[in-house]
Image (cartoon, grey):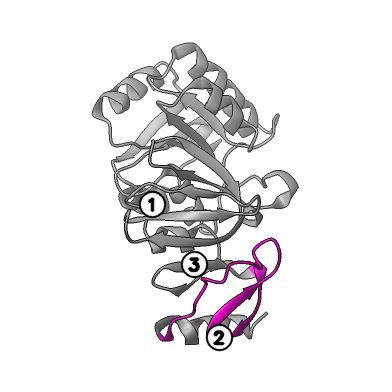
Amino acid sequence: MANEGILRTVIVDDEETAIDNLCFELKRYGWIQVVGIAKNGVAGIRLIEKERPDLLFLDVELPDMTGMDVAGRIHDAVDWKMQVVFYTAYNKYLIDALRNYAFDFMLKPVDPKELEVVLNRIQSVASGNGEPVGPLKPTPLNEKSFMVVVPTGDLRILRVSDIGYFRYLSGRKIWEAALSNGTFIPLRRNTTAENLCAYDSSFVQVHQSFIINMNYLIMVQDSRCIMYPPFDGADELQVSKKYRKKLMDRFCQL
């Protein structure tokens, strides 16, 4: 642990009540020092890069992006030991499921006993007696996983290989993901193409309305993407002039 056993801690959350509650509970632990608080994802990323904390409490749902978006964006920049705890108001059954993806989660409002369990685990890791938690630990099968938010507010964990492409539905003004099982998952209304491409470098925009998973692309023929099964029937995937050069530059690197 840094500074003679003190864990420098950052909180990224937009709810004043939740922040106050968490800070109050953390004061019971002399080895925790809150060095900064941010109330949105962009400010959180800047704060994390500036403070290089040992411990990060990260809200799942932020005004400008999800906590998983924040974790994904800082993944390559974090070259120090940092433990990450997500916390959310979603039900405990979802929390239990998400824990299987090597993250530590807590439910809002923070329960003192649950916080004690999590902090004891973190203290054990910091002292070298446990396994690390947080987004820097590889996910099962070493395949990147990420979390999306659907219009109902529910969360869904997806792997990169689950998705063949994203398409924009102009009538409903939302993006949806085409999955390998033949279904489509609608995403929340404020999801942008930039958000989707940031999940993984395999996602490349080819049209104002389409983002493809390059791992499934065979070739571009007559401005249409020819995909590997099970997405070989996706005849709608057109490449527009605006995105053609970017796609071809990327495709030629494979």
Q: Which residue is mark 3?
A: 211
Q: Quadrant of residue 66?
A: top left
Looking at this view, is 191 or 69 the one in front?
191
In magenta stretch: residue 224: yes
Q: In the rendering, at what x and y percent does residue 109 appear?
A: 37, 19
- Distance, label 2 to label 3, CA atoms, is 16 Å
x 64%, y 83%: residue: 253
Q: Which residue is mark 1?
A: 45
x 29%, y 44%: residue: 63
- Distance, label 2 to label 1, CA atoms, is 30 Å
- Distance, label 1 to label 3, CA atoms, is 25 Å
For label 1, the SS is helix
Q: Write the start and end of the magenta stretch as one range.
A: 215-241
Comes first in the chain, label 1 or label 3: 1
Q: Which mark is residue 249?
A: 2
| Residue 215 in the image: above or below residue 43 | below
Amino acid tagged 3: Ile
Q: Quadrant of residue 139?
A: top right
Q: In the rendering, at what x and y percent does residue 251 appear?
A: 61, 81
